Amino acid sequence: MLRAYIGKKPAGVKPPGRRTGTAQDKAFVLDAPLKPLTRAPLVDPFGRDISYLRISVTDRCDFRCVYCMSEDMTFLPKRDLLTLEEIDRIATAFIQRGTRKLRITGGEPLVRREIMSLFRSLSRHLASGALDEVTVTTNGSQLARHAAELAACGVRRVNVSLDTLDPDLFRTITRWGDLSKVLAGIEAARAAGLHVKINAVALKGVNEDEIPTMMRWAHGLGMDLTLIEVMPLGEIEPARLDQYLPLSMVRARLMDQYTLDDDPHRTGGPARYVRVRETGGLLGFITPMTHNFCESCNRVRLTCTGTLYMCLGQEDAADLRAPLRASEDDALLHKAMQEAISRKPKGHDFVIDRRTPRAAVGRHMSVTGG
């Protein structure tokens, strides 16, 4: 297989060389860039093209958000994780089959050691035209030191998870996060030319009264704001029913103060947008509970251990790590990918039941990736 360092080297960054030693996250040799769609596209049983892969590079995070994780999380040992080179191989295989967009997630993806070598590697597919976009979902805590290099690697958009602008409430929601570091990261991202979208989980009795303030703040800085309903993933200390706030109610409240015009803007994800006349900005709604988005789902999710989930709200999954490691030519990997997509369900199993307010899916959001 032809391998080479492709693309402009970011300033101050050494190009990756051949892997030496046994450490998982040393810099690695890059495959040559692909031509678009060099293998048959992946299409699920309902005719949906799989063009969007979300990749969790770690289950670890430097926050412990109350709707995402238990306070005393047990994280995977490093030996269980895919190496960054293996993540690159799987991503490349999906790009060969028609994936046009990658989102790097976690946990918190920017806490993984040597993570920027993966972005430098994936940038070759942007340069070749085989890939349209690489984006990142982050809590913002590490953005100040990585934003410039992300931009140099071809990343154009980042989603920052931020549920409040109140420092004390922020610490309560994240259990120990520092809001000032996140705000500094957002400013660094904007200064680097990255388009920033703020993602806020709507939490009943926690931040629901702050949503108009957050919207005005985000729009005032030229950032979109997307609101997300709590999803029943993983057993956590607060009851799901106590956290759940339907966005249909949030939207109705906002319409008492603002004019919301439906907007056709799409980013490839599940959000549906309105344009707020009074601010001029976009407001997105992700509503897995009140109005699911399954009919147009083009997404699958890869965990940091090589498990592929065809649906965020289903437990069915496929192991891609074993076929990946069984051969260097990726034939077994492509076979496993094809078989997995043939099982992609029509929709999720999310439900919040007042009689049994338990998680619909046992794994935490940090395991699957945002």
Image: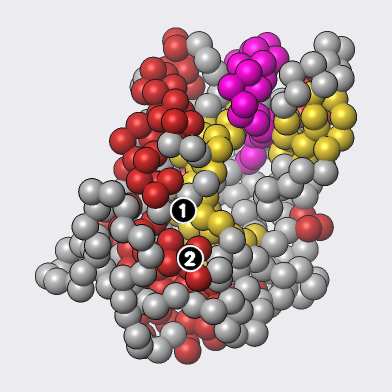
Is residue 274 left or right of 157 when viewed as pictured? right
Is residue 142 left or right of 258 when viewed as pictured? left
Distance in Å between CA atoms under marks 1 and 2: 8 Å
Magenta residues? 204-232
Residue at x-position 36% and y-position 60%: 8
Dot 1 or dot 2: first in sequence order is 2
The answer to which image quadrant residue 157 occupies is top right
Judge whether residue 228 is colored magenta.
Answer: yes
Q: Looking at the image, is 86 positioned above or below residue 163?
A: below
Residue at x-position 31% and y-position 70%: 5
Is residue 10 left or right of 185 when viewed as pictured? left
Give the camera-side residue of 4 and 207: 4
The residue indicated by pointer 1 is: 154
Amino acid type assigned to the residue bearing label 1 in the image: Gly
Give the camera-side residue of 246 and 19: 19
Instruction: Locate residue 113, reporting x and y percent.
Output: 26, 50
Disc 1 + disc 2, Cβ < 8 Å: yes
Q: Residues within 10 Å of mark 1 (few under 14, many from 20)?
A: many
Q: Looking at the image, is 220 positioned above or below residue 349?
A: above
Residue at x-position 66% and y-position 76%: 42
- Location of the N terminus by quadrant is bottom left
Q: Which mark is residue 127?
A: 2
Q: Looking at the image, is 334 positioned above or below residue 366?
A: below
Q: Residue furthest left?
A: 21
Amino acid type assigned to the residue bearing label 2 in the image: Ala
Judge whether residue 350 is colored magenta.
Answer: no
